[in-house]
Image: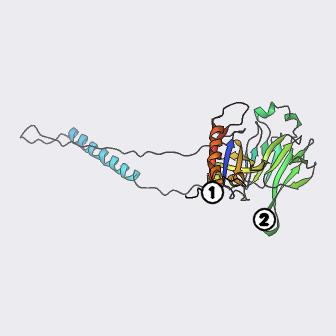
Amino acid sequence: MKDQQFPSSTSSKAHGGGACSQSQGGTFSPWHDLFSQSPGTSSSSTSTVPSSSQSSHSSSGTLSSLETVSTQELCSIPEDQEPEDPGPVPWARLWSLQDGFSNLDCVSDSYWFGRDKSCEYCFDGPLLRKTEKYRTYSKKHFRIFREMGPKNSYIVYIEDHSGNGTFVNTELIGKGKRRPLSNNSEIALSLCRNKVFVFFDLTVDDQSVYPKELRDEYIMSKTLGSGACGKVKMAFERRMCRKEAIKIISKWKFALGSSREADMAPSVETEIEILKKLNHPCIIQIKDVFDAED
């Protein structure tokens, strides 16, 4: 009997909050001018000399056709087009965790955040103004910037300028102080539990450990929890920028120590199918499943 093999890990995704939209693309359809000519005929065997008005009309029509053909030929000549400038490449991204805040791609070396209109990221959205915490945010609350460090590499810092505090991973920075900002750090404002952003360093490639099918759809972030057979990761949908929770299950660990390891893959798949059919407001809904060899 041939041994049954099954992938060693699978991941499932549950709904989260936050959204932003993004779209691009276009379609062009070619068009052509159509021309027709009908030959002239004579109803009489007697030849006549055309009048001046007829000659003028015939000459005018012939000139118009030539002009049209010339224009068509000119239109068919391809023009040299310069490639569009793709623009600067962002070095970091801030994913918003609350309604009223938007995502930010960091292109410049420095960004101010606050209620002041002079800030590059201004807290002036209509939804944000209605929140109770809006007045606790300072006009210039904090700054994110990068400086050149050793070996021609950048170091990213966050600097607190607020009256009520800026927190990184629940730790208060302190007014007038700075601290390095690492990948997947959470930024909270005024209160340590008021998490507003997740900082994502685009120069750090730690996504390659995940299956390509998963990476094409989502950007993986910090670990939310872990257990005996797997862990739950925060992730962001690339297309709609929605925040999601992704559970990664190691089927190898799930089957470890079992006398019927070959039967564990169908068992996991059956459980996934059952969970996908559940639809209840008190139960986390499974949206999608990815299966991988590693």
The residue where tag 1 is placed is: 293
The residue where tag 2 is placed is: 153
Q: Residues within 10 Å of mark 1 (few under 14, many from 20)?
A: few
Could you give the CA–CA distance between mark 1 and mark 2, rounded to whole angstroms?
35 Å
Residue 167 got which mark?
none
Res. 64 image quadrant? top left
Q: Give the vertical position of 281 relative to 29 (above or below).
A: above
Q: Position of residue 109 (x, y in %)?
A: 78, 56
Res. 138 image quadrant? top right
On screen, residue 261 versus residue 34, left or right, reads: right
Q: Confirm or deny contact between disc 1 and disc 2 (CB under 8 A).
A: no
Q: Position of residue 170 (x, y in %)?
A: 88, 46
On screen, residue 124 versus residue 1, left or right, reads: right
Query: Which circle, 1 or 2, is nearer the viewer?
Result: 1
Please report the residue visible at 71 percent of the width from the left and 36 percent of the height from the top: 284
Res. 96 image quadrant? top right
Dot 2 falls on a residue whose secondary structure is loop
- Residue at the farthest bottom position: 151
Near-viewer residue (53 or 195): 195
Near-viewer residue (144 or 132): 132
Can the viewer see residue 177 in this picture?
A: yes
Does label 1 or label 2 sit earlier along the sequence? 2
Q: Amino acid at mark 1?
A: Glu
Q: Position of residue 271 (x, y in %)?
A: 65, 42
Near-viewer residue (208 or 128): 208
Q: Position of residue 119 (x, y in %)?
A: 81, 45
Q: Where is the N terminus found, in terms of image quarters?
A: bottom right
Q: Amino acid at mark 2?
A: Ser
Q: Residues within 10 Å of mark 2 (few under 14, many from 20)?
A: few
Dot 1 falls on a residue whose secondary structure is loop
Please report the residue visible at 27 percent of the width from the left and 45 percent of the height from the top: 62
